[in-house]
Amino acid sequence: MLRAGFTVLAKKDKGRYYIHSPLKYNTTSWKKEKKGSITIYYLSSFNKAKCQNYFSTVEKYDKKLMIEGSPEIFYSCANYNEVLQLIGVDYKSDYNGRKNGTLSASENGIRLSLDGTLFSSGGEFDPHDLWHSRLHKVIPATIINRPVDEGIAYLYGSSWRLT
């Protein structure tokens, strides 16, 4: 068993190794707020107006795509460095100097996002990219008609903030 502080990072069970993220341990003191099927974790505060705008856009896209409210977990981070630190990455040269960014994954119907852009003080979300993200919940990226997808993303979400 490999440990960091009090957190178990790796465990052998029945001949298999399981690697655990320190995310839950690193956010034990964070606050939690629920909005429908979405749970937001944050350290001290987050921009509720931006949050409302984002989730109302998610709701609008999900209605068009007939997506029922599946569970989502958001961690609202100050920046991309905090995102990386929460998952145990102290430094990676590829990300040197990168201020904003988001990491996300889906498993068992639950989407997890560690966001260092959207809810931070200077960050904004892009409705165009959000369309792509929501569409991938119902149509696999391998079979999406890309020109049609881009056209719809432009129609619903503009492009680079230009309508």
Image (cartoon, helix red, strand yellow):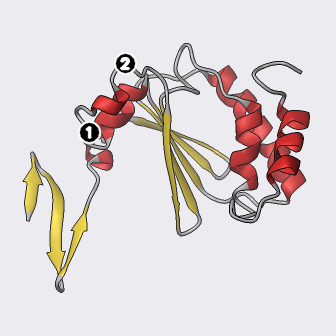
Residue 31, x across and y down, in percent: 43, 35
Instruction: Give residue 103's position: percent from left, percent from top.
Output: 47, 42
> Vertically, is 42 above or below 59?
above
Q: Residue at x 11, y 50 (%)?
A: 6
Under circle 2, the secondary element is loop
The answer to which of 24 and 126 lies nearer the viewer is 126
Q: Residue at x 26, y 46 (%)?
A: 25
24 left or right of 31 in image = left
Position of residue 19 in the picture relative to residue 55 (left or right): left
The numbered dot on residue 89 is: 1
Query: Which residue type carries mark 1?
Result: Val
Q: Look at 91% across and 35% down and name the residue there.
A: 155
Question: Which quarter of the figure has residue 142?
Answer: bottom right
Q: Earlier in the sequence, mark 2 or mark 1?
A: 1
Res. 82 visible in picture: yes
C-alpha separation, residue under disc 2 versus residue under disc 1: 15 Å
Quick check: 18 above or below 24? below
Quadrant for the N terminus, please: bottom left
Viewer-proximal residue among 56 and 136: 136
Above or below: residue 22 compared with residue 76: below
Q: Secondary structure at mark 1?
A: loop
| Number of residues whose C-alpha sits closer than 10 Å to that of mark 2, classed few (under 14), some (14–19) or many (20 or more) | few
Return the residue at label 2.
97
Dot in front, 2 or 1 = 2
Residue 144's x, y, as percent?
78, 59
- Badge 1: how crowded within 10 Å, few (<14), some, or many (20+)? few
Looking at the image, residue 121 lies above or below residue 62: above
Q: Residue at x 88, y 50 (%)?
A: 148
The answer to whether residue 114 is visible is: no
- Amino acid beneath label 2: Gly
